[in-house]
Image (cartoon, helix red, strand yellow):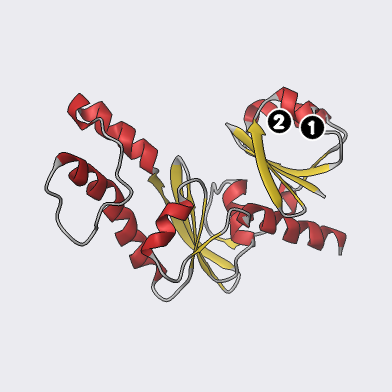
Amino acid sequence: MLLCDIGNTNIHFYKNGVIWKKKANIKNINLIDEKFYYINVNEKLKNVLKLNKLAINIEAYFHLDTAYRGMGIDRIASCYAIDNGIIVDAGSAVTVDIMSGGIHLGGYIMPGLLSLQNAFEAISPKLKMNINPNISLCSLPQNSLEAISYGAIKPFFLMFNETKKNKKIYFTGGDGKFFTKFFNDSIYDDSLIFKGMLKVIKDINA
């Protein structure tokens, strides 16, 4: 069974536990030669997918118990995979969602690490520095690189720690693995979206 998570930049594929990605464009959609289930946030590919006889859109089958409005289908799919816990998708933006007993309690969005790095550069060319992922959060910075890295990473740690309370954190996304090192009881799982999709497909076929 082939699953596709179609974003604005990339298409992430999942089959038999293996994940890979390709650029999100018409060519790569049309190269798929088998039936596939998908979710999509890419408006440019919407009509192409509708016309593809191999493509099955499962977005309408997700029914997340939440009061949150305007939640993207990719976030919904990840939440579907977890009944209890904090889900952090750390990409160009960082989304945080809280699940309790299968109910979505709410969530928030923060700029991603790369976005913050670009923001520092926009403020001043002197602040054009790559964030140091090994910065210590236990002592105050003593130079500009440490200061930028500390200022970028520490707020994430504080927000996640305040949100998690006694819940487990499930990290996904490009920077998800990096954030796991700050929380001993956290899990990195790049297949959360696909686990949510598989759960829905199972319900459809039940």
Tell me if residue 19 comes above or below residue 138 in the rendering.
above
Residue type at mark 1 is: Lys
Residue 128 visible (yes or no): yes
Tell me if residue 45 comes above or below residue 166 in the rendering.
above
Label disc, if present, on residue 5 of the rendered structure: none
Residue at (59, 59) in percent of width and height: 79
Tell me if residue 172 comes above or below residue 21 in the rendering.
below
Cβ–Cβ under 8 Å for marks 1 and 2? yes
Residue at (22, 42) in percent of width and height: 148
Residue 40 x/y as whole percent: 67, 39
Label disc, if present, on residue 50 of the rendered structure: 1
Residue 62 visible (yes or no): no
User: Residue furthest toward the bottom?
Assistant: 166
Q: Which secondary structure, mark 1? A: helix
Residue type at mark 2 is: Lys
User: Residue furthest toward the left?
Assistant: 142
Relative horizontal placement of residue 58, taking residue 71 as reference (left or right):
right
Residue at (60, 66) in percent of width and height: 82
- Foreground of the two, 27 or 63: 27
Q: Which residue is mark 2?
A: 46
Relative horizontal placement of residue 184, taking residue 18 as reference (left or right):
left
